[in-house]
Amino acid sequence: MENKSEKVAINKEELKKRLTPLQYQVTQEAATERPFTGCYNKHNEKGVYQCIVCHQDLFSSDTKYDSGCGWPAFNDVLDKGKISLHRDASIPVVISKMLGMVRTEVRCSKCSAHMGHVFDDGPPPKHLRYCINSASIDFIPMKPSAVQTKK
């Protein structure tokens, strides 16, 4: 996968001061927040979700949906170059095959922060479910439009 984003170096000590312990564990140690606990799971405002580490725009609220999985779910990214995909080796292949589930990790292409995972059980037409930790993203609300609506 080609990354269109310029990579940035992350100072781990500064990051530990800026992020909460959970945000640091999720983004830097590939931890996972508990399901149904994240602030963006049932979040429905219009706007853009950014990487909490480097502030790169990753997901649009237009592609967010309630998958029922307990984490924010999106059926697409803003741009394929803004993420990188990696085989998740945290679950042994034998167990993954027994469960019928091979996980693909999603990372920010700019800073390599762990975001979550992508699965192929999402809604049509792409059938993708980007299952993203709330602790790895920040929300930027859509600015009010300057266009007045007709009465």
Image (spheres, rainbow, N blue to C red):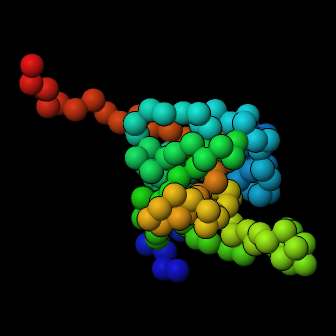
Q: Residue at x 79, y 57 (%)?
A: 29
Q: Residue at x 72, y 36 (%)?
A: 36
Q: Residue at x 48, y 33 (%)?
A: 44
Instruction: Name the quadrant containing residue 72.
Output: top right
User: How many numbered discs?
Assistant: 0
Instruction: Name the quadrant containing residue 137.
Output: top right
Q: Is residue 116 left or right of residue 73?
A: right
Where's residue 14, x and y in %? 69, 46
Note whether 146 is above or below 8 in the view shown.
above
Where's residue 15, x and y in %? 69, 47
Q: Is residue 150 left or right of residue 131?
A: left
Instruction: Report the residue that reaches farthest toward the left.
Output: 150
Q: Can you see residue 19?
A: no
Q: Can you see residue 142?
A: yes
Where's residue 4, x and y in %? 43, 72
Note whether 121 is above or below 12 in the view shown.
below
Note whether 64 is above or below 90 in the view shown.
above
